[in-house]
Amino acid sequence: MTNPNSLCESWSSPILGHLTSRIVMTAMTRSFAGPGHVATESMARYYARRAREGVGLVLTESTAVDAIGDGFPDAPRMCTPEQIASWRPVTEAVHSEGGRIFCQLLHAGRITHQDFTDGQQPVSATERPASGICRRNGKPYAVPRRLTLGEIPGIYALHCDAAIGALSAGFDGVELHLAHGYLADQFLDARVNDRNDRYGGSVANRARFAIELTERVIGACGPERVMVRISPSRWMDGLYEWPDLPELLDHLLHGLQSVGLVMLDISCARAEYAETSGRVVRYVRPRWPHFLIAGASLSAADAQQELDEGLLDMVTYGRLLIANPDLVLRLREGLPLTPYDASMLASLDVP
């Protein structure tokens, strides 16, 4: 008899319906968009192959909701009719292989440079630039402009328009990228957010942007079409997490549930799972009775344990799915995995 919680077997999600496995291809930026920031045929083949090999849910690379919110070279956007239409062949290809696909929507805030924003000054919760060098062009991060109270509803509208555009292009839903130090995280983090208005200072004020944004997009698309990614703890040149982690998580989770969110992604890029995502998952699960995904290159046994203990509903994989398009088969059969190598980022057609 098939284990109903099996990582690599099909199952029926109360929210997403029939899925081919409990493995999620997490969002990974590849910078392979075509001129005009459109999705391409090679991107369609790349995502469709993972769906064909049994990935239950595909999350696309970060897709900017606006030029000012872009943070990567040659990244896709979901702003113009041409950009929206370019995604239709991608979603059709994934669906033809029996997969489901969500578009991850990004506003990078201050984690960018004018090289990627069509020359426009980025915006943020603050006017202080991020420290260090932007690894995408080797230059210091741009100095952002602090968003005014009157501009914040416009940021919400950009996300709503992009989400509606994504659904019209055939996506099964969208993921709001509220993690990894990008715009929403710049409001959440007290070390970045230095505002003295109703979006800064207290935990409730700092969480307001993320909760209001989620509420607006759910209102536009419906709760069964919206997932949110957060990264309260991650490895970024040392362990990094919100300084008031329990209080902020409690308030944020309560607020997200109150506006109707039922799908949550806990993400910690390039991180040790037990120290970051796994620890947060164990705090979140008793407070979050809804759909929950997380992961970080877990072994099949460790991923299965997270499912069996009811900690997760699906498990995310990133670089291993770049190196192993047939990861589901390899995990199911206990076959050796091809190690990830940075050179694999040079093509969407590897290995």
Image (cartoon, helix red, strand yellow):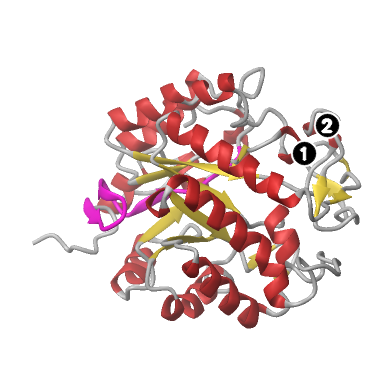
Which residue carries the number 2 mark?
Answer: 115
Q: What whole-number distance in Å separates the C-alpha atoms at marks 1 and 2?
A: 10 Å
Tell me the residue at 64%/38% (across/down).
Answer: 65
Left or right, residue 172 beside residue 7: right
Q: Are marks 1 and 2 in contact (CB under 8 Å)?
A: yes
Closer-to-camera residue (108/216): 216
- Looking at the image, residue 330 lies above or below residue 275: above
Closer-to-camera residue (62/190): 190
Which residue carries the number 1 mark?
Answer: 136
Left or right, residue 28 beside residue 262: right
Q: Nearer the viewer, mark 1 or mark 2?
A: 2
User: Which image quarter is the N terminus in?
Assistant: bottom left
Q: Position of residue 104 (x, y in %)?
A: 54, 44
**Magenta-highlighted residues:** 10-29
Q: Magenta stretch containing residue 17, yes or no? A: yes
- Looking at the image, residue 253 lies above or below residue 266: below
Give the SS element for disc 1.
loop
